[in-house]
Each structure stands twice: as C-alpha cells, then as structure tokens.
Amino acid sequence: MLRFLAAVGAAFLTFVTASGRLAVFAGLALATAFTPPFYPGVMLRQMVSIGYFSLPVVGLTAVFTGMVLALQSYTGFSRFSAEGAVATVVVLSVTRELGPVISGLMVAGRVGAAIAAEIGTMRVTDQIDALTTLSTDPLRYLVLPRLLAGVITLPMLVLVADIIGVFGGYLVGVYKLGFNPQAYLNGTWQHLETIDLVSGLVKAAVFGFIVALMGCYQGYHSRGGAQGVGRATTYAVVSASILILLVDYLITAAFFSR
Amino acid sequence: MTNTRPVPKISVRGLRKSFGRKQVLDGLDIDCGSGESLVVIGGSGTGKSVLVKCILGLLHPEAGSIYIDGAETVGLPHAARERMLQKFGMLFQGSALFDSLNVWENVAFGLVQGRGMERAAARDIALAKLAAVGLGPEVSLLRTSELSGGMQKRVALARAIAAEPEIVFFDEPTTGLDPIMADVINDLIVECVREVGTTAVSITHDMVSARKIADRIAMLYQGRIVWHGPTAEIEHSGNPFVDQFIHGRADGPIKMQVRAA
C-alpha cells in the first residue's frame, strides 16, 4: 500500500514539475513580447507556414467532416422524423466543435511536429546556442513568433474550415439527400448565434497557442541526436492533441454550461 | 609599491560543474590575457566544451567565478548577460550554421538580429568577412547545405568574427577536416585573431592545431588544469599527463573515459 502511494506521489510530483517547467517556459517566452527587439518578419513567415500551408489539409478534413455529419444526422434523425434539423445540427456542430477541434488536431500533426523537429534539430546541432552567442534571445526569436502566429492564424484557419464544413453539409444535403437549397440555407442561418462562432474562434486561438507551445517546448528541450528529435516530435503531437481535447471540454463548459 | 599586473581578459576561479553524479569541472582555475591565444587541450569528455559553455553563460556552474575584464559574470541578470555576449564570438565544432538562411545571412545574422544593423550594411560586412576567410561573393547566396565541411568552417569563422568581438572561442576548429583544410583553417584563425588583436580561447585535441594557433596551452584533466605554459615549453613540460597526451600514448596516467561529459 505504501509502495502504491509512493508511486502515485512520484507520478504527481513529476506531473507538477513538468507543468511548472512548461508554464515557466511559456511565461519567459511571452515576457519577451513587451520589450524590443521584435521580429515581425519571422512571425509573418510562421503565419504563412502555419496558416496558408495548412489550408489544403484543413479544408479537405472540413469538407468531408461536414459531408459525413449531414449524412449521419440525416440517417439518425429520420428515425424520429426530425430530418429538418440536419442543417442546424451541421452548422452548430461545425462552428462550435468540429471546426476548431479537427483543425487543431490536423495542425498539431502538421505544424506541431514540424516546429518540434525544426527547433529540436537546431538544439542538437548547437544552432540555439549559436543564436545566444550572436546576441539573439532564442525565446524571443524562435518561440514567441511561433506562439503569436499560432494564436493569430488558427482562428482564421478555423473560420475557413467552418465555411468549408458547412458547404460540405450543404452539398450532401442538397445533392444527395434532396433538401431544397433555400430551405437548407435557412436552416443553417436560423439557429446560428454569434456565441457559436465566437466560442469556436476562442477555442481555435487557444488550440493554436497549445500546438505552437508544445512544439517549441519539446523541440527546445530535445536531447540525444536524431532519436531525441524524433521523440520530441512525437511528444509534441501527442501532448498537443491531448491538451486540445482537454481544453476543448473546459472552454465548452465555460461558454455553454448552465 | 602598487600592483601593476594587468587584469586578465578572462579569469576563471574554482569553477565546478557536474551532470548528475559526474563531476566534470572540479574547481578549475585559468586565466587568459588580453590579445592572447589560449588553447585548452584534453581528451574527449574531459569538459573542455563545458568550460567554454560556462564562460559563455550557456551553462550555469554550481560554484566558482568567471571574470571578464575583471567583472564577475556568474549570476548576471539577463539584460547584462546579453550586453556581455556582444564581446564574444564563437566557432562551434559542427559549425552550427542556420540552415534556413543562406551564407551571407548566416555571417550577418549577429549584426542584423543581435545589433539591429541595416541589412545592406551588414551584407557588405559579411562579404568582406567571407573574403577574409577566402570565400568569394559567388558563395554568399548558397545554402549552407550546399557547402563542404571545410567551407562550412570558413563561413562559421566569418560569422564568429563578423562583429569583431573582443573574445573568440573556437571549439574543435579542425575536427573532421582533412590535414590540408585543417591547416588552412589554422592559418585563418591565426590571421583573423592577430589582425584584429582579439583574445582567443580554443579547445582541441589536435596537437598540430594547438601548436600552430596557441600562445599558451593549458591541459584539462579530471576537471582541473593539470599543466599550463607557453606553447614552446609543452615538449619539455615534465608533466606525465601532458607527455602522454601530446605523444598519443595509450599507457600513462590518463585513463580514457567511456561516457562524454
């Protein structure tokens, strides 16, 4: 029993230590935002890398998600003659939940991994130490631009994903399930409220921060050559994905629980 | 009577650094005078790189003092450390060039990002430094992955001296190079250091390189300096550790370590 308690205690301490390290890392990086020098060019490049180059994968995922959602909700709702709610279910599910979560997970896989691999490689090849010796703070130059780019870009990406996802639902609803186009669009707009969109975009900003933070943190602390970089990349994607799902629940509870 | 001894450019006193149970630096003392070229020799894993990283502030020692121009640098606040780092240049063992940038952007990086210089002015300086290490302007637009090992070392050397630092560190500058290219790099180091009057601290286990670039040599073993003196005296040091090392003998007081520091 004592051994079990010791193991639980050790695991808890490890968790608290890791959380503390992550929080300090994020705090130190964010603190560099308030004093010059600033690197807007680096941030713009990261925004293009995170946002623009993620558009194809996020767009494809969103359109198929909207299509499947329309199909599934139709077959489910038809059992109790509620087919008319398909458009509303699609738009609410996509804007509140599926748009931000699926975009977040896809970006975690594509961008989080790339950030961890890039910074990890820089770490194991002494490029981060070289930055320091060239009077450039690595947190300011490498980490902050990626964090800000994640926070700014993911909401834009999710907005596009929302539109494409709803369009996917429209395609299936109108061309496969035989809905009247005007009636489907009415059903889409009728019950959509600002809070639905805003909650999704807030989630997106937080997910963008999480993806960039986990990529930077794992890469920055990678050790042990190619194997260490590979491990950092895996940890970045897994930890960001788990955190996205956890934080998704917390934000949903904050916005919608009564 | 007043003490007229000049303040050393770098002075290290009682430096201790360990990783887990392994004591890498164990009360190390060393001085390096202004404009002097000091070479620290020692086997692999003896803590040469750790010593340099401690001086640069990349690693934090557990005890001891590091003075630059007589001022303590251990425990400096972040802003003061950033100012102090402008005195330093560093050539890394693996060159550590930024593969996302081309050659001239690598050389000019510290000038543009670290000191806020205009890109055009920094590019002119970068091209001049590349010329100083024997590389023409046609190389300046290449990616670093397109360069050979010797060219990468030259670019890294140009980057290390681009801002004309007061102190330059060279970490194994000739490792992995063929003997001719190693000699070219040694000549460039001697030229670059003497021309600007820079203080140089090099770490190496290449004795040919050490003899060529050093004014003074210090030998590191088990976390301490076991011998130091002018380069000319190393052949007659009378120190068994130095004798074994410079003659590359397996038998002697030095026991090889299995794990790196």
Image (spheres, coloured by chain):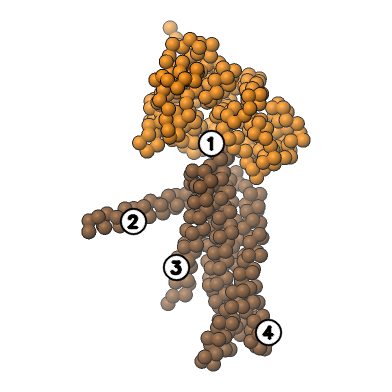
Chain colours: A brown, B orange
Q: Label 2 belongs to which residue?
A: A12
**Residue corresponding to mark 4:** A175
Pointers 4 and 1 in contact (C-beta within 8 Å): no
Quickly name the residue at label 1.
B82
Say which element carries label 1. Answer: helix
Q: Position of residue A249 (x, y in %)?
A: 45, 69
Picture quadrant of residue A16: bottom left
Nearest-to-viewer mark from 3 and 2: 2
> Badge 2, how many Cα within 10 Å: few under 14, some, many 20+?
few
Given contact means CB atoms under 8 Å apart, are the residues at marks 1 and 3 in contact? no
Q: Mark 3 points at which residue?
A: A250
Residue type at mark 2 is Phe
What distance separates the C-alpha of mark 4 from that of mark 1? 63 Å
Neighbour tally class for label 3: few under 14, some 14-19, many 20 plus, Cα within 10 Å: few
Residue B79 visible from this viewpoint: yes
* Residue B102 in sight in this render: no
- Quadrant the N terminus of chain A occupies: bottom left
